[in-house]
Amino acid sequence: MHSAADFAWLIPLLPLCGAIFIGLGLISFNDLFNRSRKQVAITLLTCLGGSAFMSYAVLAEQLSGKPTVEHLFIWASAGSFELPMGYVIDPLAAVMLALVTTIAFLVMIYSHGYMAHDPGYVRFFTYLALFSSSMLGLIVSPNLLEIYVFWELVGMCSYLLVGFWYDRDGAAHAAQKAFIVNRVGDFGLLLGILGLFWATGSFDFNGIAAGLSEAVSSGTVPIWAALTLCVLVFMGPMAKSAQFPLHVWLPDAMEGPTPISALIHAATMVAAGVFLVARLDPLFSQFPFVGLFIAIIGTLTCFLGASIALTQMDLKKGLAYSTVSQLGYMMLAMGCGAPVAGMFHLVTHACFKAMLFLGSGSVIHAMEEVVGHEPILAQDMRLMGGLRKKMPITAITFFIGCIAISGIPPLAGFWSKDEILGQAFNSFPILWFIGFLTAGMTAFYMFRLYFLTFEGEFRGENKEMQLSLLALAGKEKDEEHEEHEIGKIHESAWPMTFPLAVLSIPSVLIGFVGVPWNSVFANLLDHNEALEAAEKFSWGGFLPLAMASVAISSCGIFLAVLTYYLNQLDLGVSLSKKYPQINSFLQNKWYLDDINEKIFVRGSRKLAREVLEVDAKVVDGVVNLTGLLTLGSGEGLKYFETGRAQFYALIVFGGVIALVALFGVVGA
């Protein structure tokens, strides 16, 4: 009898078929398909819904204890070399399949409301389906080479979606930045994959781990080469999961439509890097240095993202830097040798961060009714405030997300983040302390976002503030949106509020599947590790760390309440005046964008100009000189081609005389 896993190849195929059908329809019958919005939405939702249904069936089988299913076929062979392709279904893949299809399905429903009036509605849905298919294909890939193919497809879809509004300069530049930064990481990943194949002769995850261990033990591969290959492979996840210093693309990617921010930059694409590190845990766990390197990068990213988020006034960019910080927590767990804890935080974070991004989209959608469709105004929290009374569903779900990400029990974020901090405390106490401080910063900046957006008085009618913000951005107020009625702000339609309500449920409850004394999640991913953790668990070790984590998060929330809700503490202004250098450092995002601009952008342009000078003056000069010499010699020699035998005889005689004279001089 066939199991659901035997038909898992349909999970990435269904949305791919839908995307191909709609895409070909757009190319062939553009007007017809653009008018058939509802039919297109139903078609692609059906395809993605079918993938989600099969994903849950696969997950149910894995929960019941079914073994790993792997179906392979030989894609290419030459002599003894064979390259298998296919798909694999194991607990890790089952969890990711269920997560991605759920978030993608809800985001597609949300997009029906958010993109309702956009002329590119059908194209947007097609890109969503293509991205979903690529991500699902990456999850079920059985080896590194197949993962790399889908890895690049995911990157291509990200480029298309971030730059969806390509007529906006900001979106076009953000798409290019995301594409280039990810190519840097992917180049390292490709070199690492090829190097590992050279060292082990395999692309299979377990085959690579076993082969490299044997090669290092036998001395065939030096330890420094093995470490280099591991770091090169990790460069791919560094870029995809926005780890320092390759994180700079993620905040700029907020120029894309908000549903994309929720789907790609909160729940799925950025999770691909964490997923790949979890897949390669058998390889990385052999080398303590690699684990330490990953943990340091994750901790630095965690702190960096939180510190920059403290000063952000753009609602989506504040959430983007929060995502960078939370991805750092996940990488910290991977570096501490706790992939289960990292994956658990990936799942919980995907739920509440997708809800937060969709909530921000609901707010921005409402703000556009007042300040126009200029993102600078619609996304700036200085023009928000008091929206809780006008948008209660959005406000409540956003508040739930803030509590969850702050790590307040019993919501999901507490269980997953506390597990990571506990693992870090046992492995690298210094890194734990940085992560511990970041937890307090997280609570502060998240409730800062909430209070500035939903509490207080509405500030959207402040025309002077609008003009000031536009002036800072070097823009002018669009006459088309000069006058708006404040009363137009209202709760979003059901296609936008329904996904918020659905995501709020796992944001509250899903943490209970990973309680440390009886973790169903850990038991699914690694049964032996779950048994060992349950045996080692003690309330005496758990409660002090948990209470400390809750305490520092509570302090962050308390400071945010005093500063932004009760207005009894002017924390931001006072600190910025007392420490202007630190404030400027954070507002300018650690000057990393400026450094990249100076070194890589301007530096590459300067190098290109110098190469052009060399090409114009040296290379072209040599070519032109060769041409002139050829032309000159040809012009001179043509006078010797007279056609007269006497003239040729005279030249021969003259040549003989010259040779005799030359030999005579040499002989003398």
Image: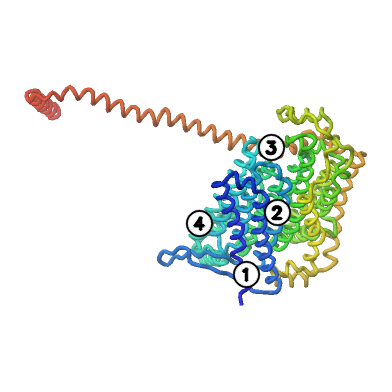
Asked whether disc 4 touches disc 3, contact meaning CB atoms under 8 Å apart, the reply is no
- Say what amino acid the circle numbered 1 marks: Ala
Which element carries disc 1, helix, strand or loop? helix
Residue ID for mark 2: 267
Q: Distance between the residues labelled 2 and 1?
A: 24 Å
Q: In which quarter of the image is residue 120?
A: top right
Image disc number at residue 194: 4
Badge 4: residue crowd in 10 Å (few <14, some 14–19, many ≥20) = some
Which color scheme did the rendering employ for the protein?
rainbow
Image quadrant assignment for residue 21: bottom right
For marks 4 and 2, give the one nearer the viewer.
2
Q: Give the answer, above or below, for where 8 lies relative to 600.
A: below
Regarding residue 304, the answer to whether it shows in the image is no
Residue at (77%, 61%) from the top-left corner? 419
Q: Are marks 4 and 1 in contact (CB under 8 Å)?
A: no
- Residue at label 1? 5
Give the residue number, with chain letter if any, for mark 3: 591
Q: Earlier in the sequence, mark 4 or mark 2?
A: 4
Of marks 3 and 1, the one in the foreground: 1
Three-letter amino acid code of the residue under disc 2: Ala
